[in-house]
Amino acid sequence: MTVNRPVDWHLLVSQLLNGLQLGLLLFLLASGLTLIFGIMNFINLSHGAFYMVGAFVCATVVQATGSLLTGIVLSLASLLVIGAAVEWLIARKLYQNDHLDHVLVTFGLILVFDTLAHIIWGPAGMVIPLPEILNGQVRVGSFVIPSYRLVIIGNGLMVGVALYILITRSRLGMLIRAGASDRDMVTALGVNIDRLYLVVFAIGAAMAGFAGLLIAPITEASIGMGNEIIIIAFVVVITGGIGSVQGAFYSALIIGILDTLGRSYLDDFLGLFLSNQAAETAAPALSAMMVYILMATILVFRPQGLFSPSGLRK
Amino acid sequence: MFKFLENLPARVYLAVTALLAVAPLLVTLGSQPFYLDLLTRILILAIAAVSLNLIIGFGGMISLGHAAFIGIGAYCVGIPAHYDIFNGFIHLGLAISCSAAFALITGAISLRTHGLYFIMITLAFAQMLYFTFVSLDEYGADDGLIIYQRSDFNGLLNLENPTTLYYTVLVTLLGLLYLMHRLVHARFGRVIIGCKHNEKRMQALGFDTYRYKLTCYVISGTICGIAGFFLGNFTNFISPEMMDWTHSGELIFMIVIGGTAGIFGPVVGTAFFLLLEEMLSGLTQYWQLIFGLVLILLVVFGKGGVHGLLVWADTRQTAQAQPENDS
Amino acid sequence: MKLKMQRPQTGLLAAMMIMLPLSVFADSVKIGFVTTLTTPASVIGEDMRNAVNLAVEHLGGKMAGKEIEVIFEDDGFKPEIGKQKTDKLVKKDDADFVAGFIWSHVLLASSKSVLDSGKFLISSNAGPSQLAGKGCHPNFFSTSWQNDQTPMAMGEVLNEQGIASVYIIAPNYAAGKNMVAGVERTFKGNVVGKDLTKWGKDRQLDFSAELAKAKASGADGLFIFYPGSAGGAFLKQYQQAGLKASLPLYTVFTVDSLSLPKLQAGNIEGVLGSKSTMFWAPDLDNAANKRFVADFKAKHGNYPSFYAAQSYDTIMLINSAVNATGGDLDDQDGLRAAMEKAEFDSIRGRYRYNKNHMPIQNFYLREVVTDAAGNWTTSIVSTVYENHQDSYAGECSL
């Protein structure tokens, strides 16, 4: 099966776009995680639950009203509220605690959110129906690209740029940057630190929800969908360096593209050294491991990840 | 001689141990063999939890990849059994050496990092092992393998007998707890605990902390491999799912619930975790909602797990008994 | 109220219970049913549970005059939990039959507990080759199929339809590999490409890379296997990639009554007309099936899935055995002999058991159509195999 065919440029470009799309989704999740960890020193496993809730709320609203836009707006609004509530009721009490406590509490939150979703929306999962135009394809020259994939890429880039502007140009962004590198200093400046934490947590939750509602038309809203991706989002955070949004952006793109290219070309590549049978067995295993191998390798040479805000606690 | 019995945690733990020692008798009287299974499972996972607590509670190294060692230990029973090798000494020897080797290699790399980085890199190694076993068709891939016959110790121990298996595990656990006690109170333990609080200072005192921590990690992994050896025998089954990161997470929960400060805490935590799970899952399909809430409440209102709670109750009791000493 | 009136007698009753042999008091037929009731896979488990309850209802709650007691247990999609629950059913509840099992790994992990205890194990779905071949057991029965059979039928369909080359995409786990091996065994054309995607808890649900490869391969057809919600995700992306015209879809265990309503809600028309093979379809023409499908639809509003059909048959198979021994649950040989005959009206029509206790049955080609009420469903096009036996029966020494 693994013939040495010439490089198919069409295929390569579509795979790069697919990788970009995956990377941007990972970035939406990871940027919230890295901020929450970088600023509040809080490990939030339940971030994936926000991703799931975003998808479910959007699906419910779209199915009821038929308007995708209403779905998106209401979904994001509800996540700002849920994110703020989780911060206010639970996370806030635990910032001073051990990381172990964070892991335990947020795992408990995952169970609560997942089971509530099961009770509210049933086990079957929900689709977000797309307008006809988004269910089709776009032709650029001889390229045919599913149009919804372009929507994801466009939105991902848009949020990325908006976040960049927010962090580099606004007062909130300045506080966030300062908070990620030196928390005590921000407090010393007389900033209402509680409110800063609340806002960061809520924004992080909304971004996770946005990622969830973006992916749902491709997959669907389903229980536990966030638990499947949260680990990879953590890999992105770690590889990029905790607390660094910039690092999260680059490592998300690297991981998204590497993962996609691995799935596309690894069997052909291994076929050069191994028998077809062996390549067929090894390729899926190796491509599943690839992001972990990448992370471990980077950590061996840079134990603090690719980009690490200076002065961050270990 | 029984001075240690004056503190409350020690009395409670002794009572738990005594209860565990007579448990098979009670189970037989009640003709409920199922509960012996449940207890055996608790004890096996308690071994794993105690081993994990050595690095987390005392060493401050949070590993999210400890289930990999359970998997290694179990496959060291399952793979030889697949080739009709049932000799328990071979199984156990393999389990110990393979898990020690895995711990040495991954530990040497992982210990270059700290904190969340360490959590994630240990997870990464466990995931790599998981996907490796998923791709091994010879050993059933993700379907796993049935172990048709338990490890055979040349007639010394008949693990097919549930009561024998139970007592073997219990004795192992007690031996392990004694070992932990000695280890933690020896110089080695003090260095490890010192590293948790201030590694730089330990280095300044001239200790090669990296080697101490690596040794600690290897000891922990090896013991967890022994737990895996028992789990494989107990469930008569192996599958890559045993190494899934959620199992590593569950082990962490067990020790947090029990309290990381004591040696015995993880045992209580494991029992609490598994009994609660067993009880709730029998109640409703939506039991995870209650389970999740309990976990949250335990942390928000807890005081260092069960062990912390006992210590707190003990000091309060003592304080009430001797108010004049306080002032 | 009743409880209060009986209270004075309970002491006496208890004393009698201790003195009398237990079997006299076994006035119920206890069936343990292990399935998945949490995680997204619970959509399958709940469908199975609904079918079991419908079967019990159809039997009037009794088998040979004895009360039917079904104990449902959740395996949480994990072999270890499944085994634990099975142990509970065997040791604590003392169930007479342990049935259910969606997943091969859960069934394999649990099988030893049930079979060692001398009870009957009936798979309502999973069909791993181990239990059909070398690991076959006198007390193990299946009301489904062996994994390889359905894709083998699909291979024949591809041959008949003159498909010269296919691209294969399936999840990377044991059943996924079985499906691929099955279709490759009978398909005579060229497999131009094959992708096994990550499966398990963090399974891959975005198939953009694989679809792009399939499209570039120039294959005549696309064969996939994606059970559960992953199937819906795949079909949506297949539609969005606009491949319906150039790359017709052939599936096994992917397009079913669980995924079709959702696909219809999402307006994924690409799935209409796609072909799949199976031992059964909701419109299979026999009296038992008509009653089952009509009553299931009346009660739950949607078509039953094949998982439901197999679970319904599980209860009916047990019923036929219990009736044959006149309700004597200790007559193991009698129960076994009765089950081997499979003398009951199955929703697939009459079938026989092979020596490894896997059904010898027909396999059909099905197509996705719109029914009279406007709902999408699968409908039988033709019969691919008649009385097909699985490939592992030869390895079974029974």
Image (spheres, rainbow, N blue to C red):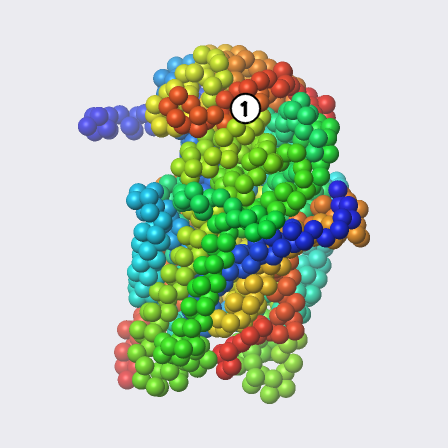
Dot 1 falls on a residue whose secondary structure is: strand
Residue at the image position 62 percent from the left and 55 percent from the top: A13
Res. A88 in view: yes
Left or right: A124 in relation to C255: left
Report in which chain the residue with disc 1 lies. C
Left or right: C3 in relation to C263: left
* Residue topped by disc 1: C366
Residue nearest the viewer, comparing C385 with B77? C385
Q: Position of residue C339 (x, y in %)?
A: 55, 17
Mark 1 Cα-neighbour bin, 10 Å: few <14, some 14–19, many ≥20? many
Q: Position of residue C163 (x, y in %)?
A: 67, 29
- Which amino acid lies under the numbered mark 1 shown in the image of this protein? Arg
Left or right: C397 in relation to B278: right
Residue at the image position 57 percent from the left and 84 percent from the top: B200
Q: How many marks?
A: 1
Residue nearest the viewer, comparing C283 with A150? A150
Q: Position of residue C5 (x, y in %)?
A: 20, 26
Residue at the image position 56 percent from the left and 66 percent from the top: A251
Residue nearest the viewer, comparing A102 with A67? A67
Residue nearest the viewer, comparing A35 with C76? A35
Q: Is residue C93 above or below residue A57?
A: above
Q: Position of residue B235 (x, y in %)?
A: 58, 43
